[in-house]
Amino acid sequence: MGRLFGTDGVRGVVGQEITCELAMQLGKAAAMVLADGGSHPPVVVLGKDTRISGEMLGAAFSAGLCAAGANVLDVGVLSTPAVAYLTRKYKADAGVMISASHNPWQFNGIKLFNKDGFKLPDELEEHIERLVLDQQSELLAASVEYIGTIEHSTTALRDYIEYLKDTAPCMLRGMKIAVDCANGSAAMSAKLLLEQLGAQPELFGCEPDGLNINRGCGSTHLEQLQEYVASHPDIVAGVAFDGDADRCLFVDETGTEVDGDFIMAICGLNLLEKGKLSRNAIVGTVLTNLGFQQFCRRNGIAFEATKVGDRYVLEKMEQEGFALGGEQSGHIIFRQFATTGDGQLTAIQLLCLMQQKNMPLSELTKVMKKVPQVMENIKVSPTGKLRFYTNQPIEQAIEQAKKQLGEGGRVLVRLSGTEPLIRVMVEGEKKEEIQQIATDLARVIATELAD
């Protein structure tokens, strides 16, 4: 991770880590880096989620772009993958999404895409960081006749929905689906998309007010959706998006959670059967459940693991030419269609599989058995994160936990790239044992890194 950029852009609490001044400087720097000596003023597609700070930070970033001579095409409130797609469709030079994804409303962030809809590589992010933090004198403003302009798109939502519909292998006629939009970006598009495919969506989390994004709803809070689906026999499944709709999780007809590992297993096996799983491989991360890896071995599928973060999954897919990859959290990348995780695209693919196979989701999930896994999140300060790397008691506690589990389990302790957290993951056959190990490790970390 860089000084400003984490695994998913620049992110932090608005008014503290993320300010209008920083957004404007990032806009100027991005315009300079992405223009790269081109013969025309760069055009940047800009979208945002529903946070109250989105308009403010979007305006500040746009002002920085325009001050450096770039033009802005503002597509309004849409999902992160919509911005990636529209950047390609409109042949823009870059895209920017103002969002903090699954974080609470107090947070916001800035994600950048290149002209092909890919997240920026580390070297370009580092170049932007240097300009903002070390070389502000080089952030030159365009002369008045060359300052940029801002245009507001009137077709972006329609264009994105049409693109998603084109990825659907079937219609969803008659399917009653519970859909939780997290009071975020999907609230703009999910209902229209599903209805145009013939489904009958029943909506939750579709009343954003700027302050309720991800609050007790969406992919990080499945309880309401699980209860509703389990108590309504006519609902075939539930779908939950996060704030910027770049990921989704499912709930089967019994109310049981279906996470990204299950989604990859179901969709990957379907691609394999059709001969469309390139190189017979799927890309996951170090957090991918051991049960998924066992599923891959049983079915002759190679499993490739990367660092946590969909950008690293995509990098591996691009390097090796793989077709499918993703994360347990619900970032699923179908490379045939997209350059980033897309929750609504993922939802369409899995719902169509249910429709085509005429099988309930609970039956489809039987392709994989999940190994028990627990997660503990420990909130730490920036200085606490730094001390994590050199703390001997923490290192010793991790080694002891690994010895206790032996070869029948895993322990992974890592810094979050998107939140002020250290995450502890423990996997093993005995749920009570791994929960105790995770709790003990979390206690050591919290004690050692307390300010």
Image (cartoon, rainbow, N blue to C red):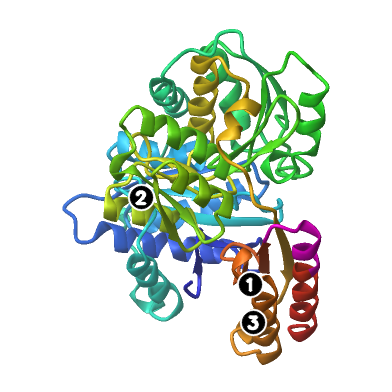
Question: Mark 3 to mark 1: distance in Å?
Answer: 11 Å
Residue shown at the point (30%, 41%) measured from the top left: 278
* Residue toward you, 306 or 140: 306
The residue identified by callout 1 is: 406
The residue identified by callout 3 is: 399
With 177 as the anchor, is 127 left or right in this view? left
Query: Which quadrant of the structure image shows residue 396?
Result: bottom right
Whether residues under marks 3 and 2 lie with C-beta atoms below 8 angstroms apart, the answer is no
Which residue reaches farthest left? 39
From this viewpoint, is residue 183 visible? no
Residue shown at the point (57%, 14%) measured from the top left: 195
* Residue toward you, 188 or 349: 349
Badge 2 crowding class, 10 Å Cα cut-off, few under 14, some 14 to 19, many 20 or more, is many
For marks 2 and 1 on the same chain, the one whose residue lies earlier in the sequence: 2
Which residues make up the magenta segment?
A: 428-436
Residue 165 is labelled as none
Q: Nearer the viewer, mark 2 or mark 1?
A: 1
Question: Mark 3 to mark 2: distance in Å?
Answer: 37 Å
Residue shown at the point (44%, 73%) measured from the top left: 132
From this viewpoint, is residue 395 visible? yes
With 297 as the anchor, is 172 left or right in this view? right
* Residue toward you, 91 or 344: 344
Q: Is residue 188 shown above or below 396?
A: above
Q: Nearer the viewer, mark 3 or mark 2?
A: 3
